Image: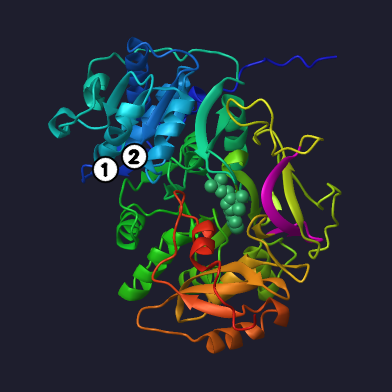
Amino acid sequence: MLGRIMDNQLLISGLLQHADFTSGDREIVTRTVEGPIHRYTYHDAHKRARQMANALQALGVQLGDRIATMAWNTYRHFEVYYAVSGIGAVTHTLNPRLHASQLAYIMNHAEDAFVFVDLNLISLIENVADELRGLKGVIVMTDRDHMPETTLANVYCYEELIDSHSDEFEWPRFDENTASSLCYTSGTTGNPKGALFSHRSTMIHAYASALPDVLHMGESEVILPVVPMFHVNAWGIPYGATMVGAKLVFPGPKLDGASIHELLVQEDVTFAAGVPTIWLMLLAHWRETSSSAPALKRTVIGGSACPESMIREFQDDYGVEVRHAWGMTETSPLGSVSIPKPSMTDDATRLRKQTKQGRPVFGVEMRITDDAGKALPHDGKAFGDLQVRGPWIIDNYFKMDQSDAHSPDGWFATGDVATIDPDGYMEITDRSKDVIKSGGEWISSIEIENLAVSHPDVTQAAVIGVPHPKWDERPLLVVVPADGKSPSHAELTAFLSDKLAKWCLPDDTVYIDELPLGATGKVLKTKLREQFGDHKLPTA
Ligand code: AMP
């Protein structure tokens, strides 16, 4: 017997329509690419998204067409999210940090019909324009006065498109399983692969993300997503925040500590989201200027492991709660969040749990398995491949018939190696390809890195395995020293030795000015392995 409930489809356009209805006067503030601060409301955003929807249809955009964006977090990018997905086309966000050859590959693979581009990113599209097959036009996200000279063909001005179209538009209704947005990820091997989200997956993810024990989003919050809208849709915040009518603050292209601090303070931001690298810059700024952001209550930190020292500094020195979260492009991205249980009253236990990647968000099922695919116990010790499944986890990459990332029984293999403890907290110990195997035992590079950065003379740290004649591989510590400091290997190992098992201590330390970062801000261990892979260990 079926229930007698309306089969209304969950569509992204409904979010903005609802925000206009219920929180139409709530603000959306942007540091624009042109420079000044722009502010308007959900009501205005909805009106302009409808104008842009009309403009796109006039340009011939149809259901299922891929429309790319090469853009920072701004109100215009927000409007494009809703206009494109709202008419049933697919918002394909491009990462400006990609290499030109990857960018051309991705845009051709996606068969992008149009690309929206920010003023200061236009050269990235110019560089690959000759290689793009099937691109029909470029929309520059600015007004007539700021339109640049360009070598590109079929160029449109964003504000002119909006101005020349009516805001009378009825959002179309279609199947909620229709694709809504597309985001490529570098994955572990081969060419980048596309994660293709649907209206349904995005909407269920939005409901889940707003929950108090997830991102705690509500109308009274002022939310600043530092995490880019080109990286897994800014962790879904442009959808979840709109669902609840929260005030949104978009940082535009300026992501340095001082610029983020300015917005946090001026707009009374209560909740901000970003990767650890961003928060390192903000915390350094706060330390140098003896400042803080009094309204800020909470941050969600993810994308790579959040070091304990960062959690302590935010919470103890500034009263900002840290929510350490784990996820991937393939998981939309919310997978788990680490919040201590109410029964955990002792500070040390609470902090220890927060350094873990946390418990799965409802909707995500999680398991760890051994090489034979057998599920491992939740004892906090057994390491295994982390696998997940749920209504916002991909079941295959875009245009791929077969997935090599899924288990025979349909779980997505994340490529992360993790433990799960008896309280249900998952802890990532490595990417499977980064794991260090010493004498048959696994050593967690992330654990050493997190401890090493808590040394006062260390700004950043990475650990890679290098060949060893006896142990197969041993850990090498790569350190970016703090300004004017040069911590020796002996000092660093002495510092680590009361926190790590002896056989996990790095065999040597090398120094580097900065860590090589990939397009999404994660440390490129492949580059470090190229550079230091044949480093002669003193123990070898
Ligand atoms: P991406 O798809 O680019 O967002 O990268 C996803 C990968 O980032 C995951 O598979 C993890 O390896 C890593 N990652 C994300 N969040 C965390 C976290 N909180 N701690 C450690 N690694 C993380």
Mark 1, Cα crowd under 10 Å, few <14 / some 14-19 / many 20+, is many
What is the number of the mark on residue 32?
A: 1
What is the number of the mark on residue 91?
A: none
Q: Main secondary structure of the magenta part?
A: strand
* Mark 2, residue position: 74
Q: Residue at x 33, y 75 (%)?
A: 288
- Verify whether residue 426 appears in magenta: yes
* Relative to 242, 307 lies left or right: right
Q: Residue at x 67, y 55 (%)?
A: 432
Question: In x, y percent, where is residue 311?
Answer: 55, 68
Q: Residue at x 34, y 62 (%)?
A: 257
Instruction: Tell me: residue 396, above or below residue 514.
Output: above
Question: In x, y percent, where is residue 345?
Answer: 71, 70
Question: In x, y percent, where is residue 163?
Answer: 23, 19
Quadrant into which the N terminus falls: top right
Q: Residue at x 38, y 25 (%)?
A: 46
Instruction: Tell me: residue 196, above or below residue 323.
Output: above
Q: What is the quadrant of residue 115 in the picture?
A: top left
- Verify whether residue 260 appears in magenta: no
Segment colored magenta: 411-427
* Relative to 458, 117 lies left or right: left
Given the image, on which type of amino acid does mark 2 rest?
Thr
